[in-house]
Image: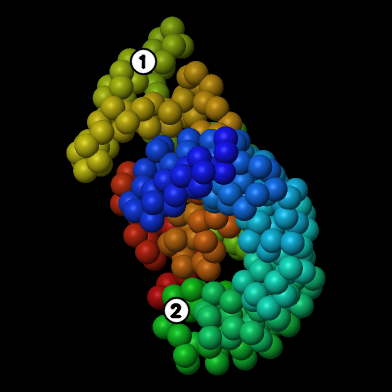
Amino acid sequence: MDRGETQSLRQEVDRALRGAFDPADVLPRLARLARLAAPSSDDAIFANQKLAELLVERDPWRAALYVRRALAQRDGDDRSWALLAFCQTLLGNFRCAASAYKKAIACAPANPWYAHNLGHLLDVALGEPARALDWLGLAYRAKADNSEIVASYVHALARAGRIGEARAILERARGRFDSRELDALLRWLDQGAPSRARRDDGATSPAKRRSPGATPVRLARVLARGLSHLPLDPRQRERALALARDALPPPRKRGADGAPSATPRARGATTPKRRRAAGRTGDAARAAAIEAREAQLQTGGPRPSESDVAGLAAAVAYAIVYIDHVPLSQAEVAAPFRVGVARLRGRFAELRAKLDIIRGDARYATTRR
């Protein structure tokens, strides 16, 4: 393709991106531009970056391939390194993500968000709050007027054992911000910033004592593994298991021959709540498919895919985050479960419709406002 044709295609892409574009329309054009433009040209680098940005939440693996192509031609671009770090975070490759954020910081040391993202990754995903403090402190000193940066710094300080310092910063910030996330952090500090594994007295947490048979084993295993990477206390983990049980349909009764009986739910009928949710979305078939997928987890029907189980587990974890006002984003919750943000968002919406979940929900909240 000659330069004139490349420019024409680039202009088409730019017009589509400026408008209310349909990704299904613009993605093929971007892919064509990336393929036909000279690899080191601005057009090719732009196309690969934009492809990565549009794909990262639903297909982080492909997005990482595209952004690596851009970096192969221009390795001093901080945005590309930060985008690669986000891809690796969603894929669960946390150490690779940390390395990419360090490259982004080297390219743009004045950007406080790169330092914040690296520090929060070290604290929450890798469980290394002491290493996170330098980066989060750097972000805090540059942008103390942002409640998200304050919350991340306070969280890491407390986990590193510097609770008094964390409380002083938090109380100053609460005078400036009206933030539920900061209120939730204060309650957490009031509880002594409990660790994830054991209570202060060394006793096994209630979640560990609960019979594993109460929740389908496969879902419980995936949920517990993902929760271990999130800053939730034992009571929140216990409530997550309870919420997971409520999210699934009841076990199907078995007939005299030991086979599952043909209950209305087994035949594909939906509950009144599910029908109301389907009416709101205008997609009854999708609602029935959701229920069938959940029934598979509970009854031993056709084995659901790993992504189905992980998606439900991530949604359950985010439901606890949502209910208790824990200062974590959907991307941060999705990362340990290795699911895309779009999948988490969709499954969480299903959970909210099915269980009528609200902020501070008395059934699952561990704190009282």
The quarter of the rendered structure image containing the N terminus is top right
Residue 153 spot, x, y in % from top left: 65, 77
In the image, what residue type sits under mark 2? Ser
Please indicate whether residue 133 sits to the left or right of residue 169 in the image.
Answer: right
Q: Which residue is depicted at the point 46% across and 44% down?
A: 8
* Quadrant assignment, res 23: top left
In the image, what residue type sits under mark 1? Ser
* Quadrant assignment, res 107: bottom right
Q: Which residue is depicted at the point 34% across and 53% down?
A: 19
The quarter of the rendered structure image containing the C terminus is bottom left
Q: Which residue is depicted at the point 54% across and 50% down?
A: 50
The numbered mark, 1 or 2, whose residue comes first in the sequence reads 2
* Quadrant assignment, res 197: bottom right
Q: 154 or 84, which is in the foreground?
A: 84
Callout 2: SS: loop
Of tags 1 and 2, the one toward the viewer is: 2
Please indicate whether residue 295 sits to the left or right of residue 103 in the image.
Answer: left
Q: Residues within 10 Å of mark 2 (few under 14, many from 20)?
A: some
Q: Residues within 10 Å of mark 1 (few under 14, many from 20)?
A: some
Give the colour scheme of this rendering.
Answer: rainbow
Numbered label tally? 2
Q: 334 or 225, which is in the foreground?
A: 334
Residue placed under numbered mark 2 in the picture: 179
Residue 125 spot, x, y in % from top left: 69, 58
The answer to whether any part of residue 293 appears in the image is yes
Q: Which residue is depicted at the point 76% across and 52% down?
A: 96
Residue placed under numbered mark 1 in the picture: 261
Q: Is residue 113 above or below residue 223?
A: below
Q: Spot the residue most to the top.
A: 257
Could you tell me how far apart the alpha carbons at marks 1 and 2 are, in whole angstroms? Answer: 50 Å
Q: Is residue 343 above or below residue 203?
A: above
Callout 1: SS: loop
